[in-house]
Image (cartoon, rainbow, N blue to C red):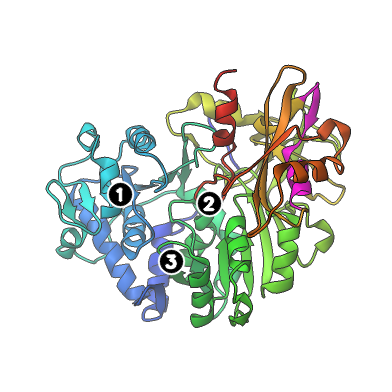
Amino acid sequence: MKKIEIPDPGFETGDDAGSAFREIVRTKGDQTALIFKDRRISWTELGSQINRVANALLSLGIQKNDRVAILSRNSVEYVELFFGALSAGACAVPLPTMASPDALKLMITDSAPRILAVSHEFLGHMAPFIDAFDSIVNNGKLGLDFDNTGWKNYEDWIAAAPDGVPDVKVDKDSEFNIIYSSGTTGVPKGITHTHGVRKAFAEGLQGLFEAPDMVNLISTPLYSNTTMVTWLPSMRYGTTSVLMEKFDASGFLRLCENEKVAMAMLVPVQYDRILRVDDFDKYDLSSMLVKFSTSAPLLPALKRQIIDRFPGELVEIYGLTEGGVSTVLIASERQDKLDSVGQPVPGCEVKIIDEQGKVLETGQIGEIVGRQAYMMTGYQNREDATNEMLWYDKDGKLFFRTGDIGRMDEEGFIFLLDRKKDVIISGGFNIFAIDLEKELLKHESVRDAAVIGVPSQTWGETPLAFVVLEDNQAETSESILEWVNTRLGKGQRISKMEILDEIPKSSIGKTLKKDLRKPYWAKS
């Protein structure tokens, strides 16, 4: 595998996450760092706990780039352990709570953690195979909220550790985290980032996070890169964070009102649920300055509802956990571009290429590729998958392939059409599922929609639609199918439709089309 050469992030001594956090502890001291349920934790208190974790890890022999894996819902202990690992020079491995035991086993085997921390809720996931991992050090299995034979209670573990600053040097190439992909396309891949890359990731929003009285509400899982967009800058630049153990729409609105929340990162499915809360309009959301959205397409109709009903700026971000591409749409400023995901951020270069790797002209449709200072070092133990992602321009500059099909207009706005693997090829013509899904969502009875290609003897593939109806709707699949097909081109028409109670999605709201496709392609 060729070494991934990325733009220099401009890393200096003290730019690592642990050092940046300790500077905030020094300057903000007794101000509130974290709010969780009925707890209000100061920067000084949080800093002491994180130092204890780091020193406890060092006492177990944890060295630079050793992995510390965590499986838990959002909690104060999660925050302490994640940043304690970084402060000890270790690499954090946040494991997805929605993963199956089999998938978790693969992730743990792949990352070979020296420490494994688990909350009691997920202990049963580990039971069938916990003794199979010889990478874990003695006393390296931590129970975040329980005492069990073979597991060290987290609070007892750090109680005796000193709270002084650990004597650890972290450079730009030190591993920061391994984040496992959501698994929408098969076996999750471990995405490795360094401290230098994460510094570049966070600094673009520095001014916003340093603003006075900024309060950030975190309602997405701490294992997701989506959450990192606001969580990491909050820890790095001193923004108070309100942490939800897990998301619920009414609870989110109560916290916004009670804590005068000014900022939040949400995924599209969360926006939909929030706007459907019966008494949404009674909540005082006047403190909200900016709301972010990422991880899945935010359709124009939903953007319009958010702009009209939910105070604060709406900022949509398009990018990959792997990095390479970052675009931003400030929705209210460019309401004529609501069907786009915005323009590349400063320092990000984006191109559209064809199947042969040729750069396409403005307006032409192809695969989106990009480069910037925020780019992974590679997939953990997956040289083949890493190499598949690399594309070089005529000057030898490295770009990451996104696997997304789209186009760029004359102003540099990017328009997504489909995942490359999800394009439906019917009778030799490309059909983009998003075009069909957008049309379905215009029907007043349709709450959610997804379209996939299924085998067809006549056409090779043909579109199949799944829809979720609004409450108390009596429409049939036949009536909606007839309605939508009169609005689609002849070559786009949907062959069949199924009504579901819910379309399968990942924890951050991505439609799991592999789950929808599986029954239809299993025998093909």
User: Measuring 39% from the left and 35% from the top, which residue is drawn there?
Assistant: 103
207 or 260, nearer to the observer: 260
Assess whether residue 218 is covered by the magenta stretch.
Answer: no
User: Measuring 28% from the left and 69% from the top, which residue is drawn there?
Assistant: 48
Which of the labelled discs sits on residue 244, or is there none? 3
Viewport quadrant of the C terminus: top right
Number of numbered tags placed on the structure image: 3
Q: Amino acid at mark 2?
A: Ile
**Residue 463 sits in which quadrant?**
top right
Q: Is residue 202 above or below residue 100?
A: below
Q: Residues within 10 Å of mark 1 (few under 14, many from 20)?
A: some
Q: Percent x, y for residue 397?
A: 67, 34
Q: Percent x, y for residue 452?
A: 67, 34
Instruction: Indicate the secondary structure of the residue bearing disc 1.
Output: helix
Q: Is residue 157 above or below residue 290?
A: above
**Residue 403 sits in which quadrant?**
top right
491 or 296, nearer to the observer: 491
Q: Is residue 480 above or below residue 231?
A: above
355 or 27, nearer to the observer: 355
Q: Are marks 3 and 2 in contact (CB under 8 Å)?
A: no
Mark 3 to mark 1 CA distance (whole Å): 18 Å
Instruction: Indicate the secondary structure of the residue bearing disc 3.
Output: loop
Which of the labelled discs sits on residue 122, or is there none? 1
Mark 3 to mark 2 CA distance (whole Å): 15 Å
Write down the residue under mark 2.
508
User: Measuring 30% from the left and 49% from the top, which residue is drawn there?
Assistant: 122
Q: Residues within 10 Å of mark 2 (few under 14, many from 20)?
A: many
Q: Is residue 393 visible?
A: no
Q: Amino acid at mark 1?
A: Phe
Left or right? Give the position of 397 relative to 493: left
